[in-house]
């Protein structure tokens, strides 16, 4: 679990420093997806099986913990 947490935090930090570079290196997102719409990106990633709802929930939970 600790390793997973470090991985997630590393991904989060890379994403924050350069979101488009991170997304393009990590995921396959075609140009027809509206890259300015986070929901469109998430929907594409889930519908293509690149991420699961559980993974998104974990990231959102971590984000909420960091904000509070």
Image (tube, rainbow, N blue to C red):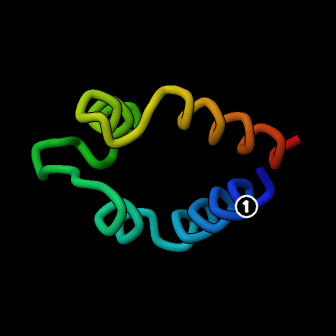
- Residue 37, placed above or below residue 13: above
Residue 5 x, y percent position in the rendering: 73, 55
The secondary element bearing badge 1 is classed as helix
- Residue 43, placed above or below residue 1: above
Quadrant of the image occupied by residue 17 = bottom right
Residue 50 x, y percent position in the rendering: 33, 42
- Residue 26, placed above or below residue 28: below
Q: Residue furthest right?
A: 68
Name the image quarter holding the C terminus.
top right
Quadrant of the image occupied by residue 37 = top left
Q: Residue at x 56, y 28 (%)?
A: 54
Q: Nearer the viewer, residue 22 or 53?
A: 53
Residue 7 x, y percent position in the rendering: 64, 62
Is residue 12 left or right of 40 when viewed as pictured? Answer: right
Mark 1 residue crowding within 10 angstroms, few (<14) / some (14–19) / many (20+): few
Is residue 40 left or right of 31 when viewed as pictured? Answer: right
Circle 1 residue: 3
Q: Residue furthest left?
A: 32
Q: Residue at x 72, y 63 (%)?
A: 6
């Amino acid at each position: 679990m600790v390793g997973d947490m470090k991985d997630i935090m590393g991904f989060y930090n890379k994403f924050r420093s350069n979101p488009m570079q991170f997304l393009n290196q990590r995921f396959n997102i075609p140009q027809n997806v509206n890259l300015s719409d986070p929901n469109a990106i998430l929907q594409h990633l889930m519908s293509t099986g690149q991420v699961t709802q559980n993974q998104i929930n974990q990231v959102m939970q971590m984000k909420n913990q960091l904000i509070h």
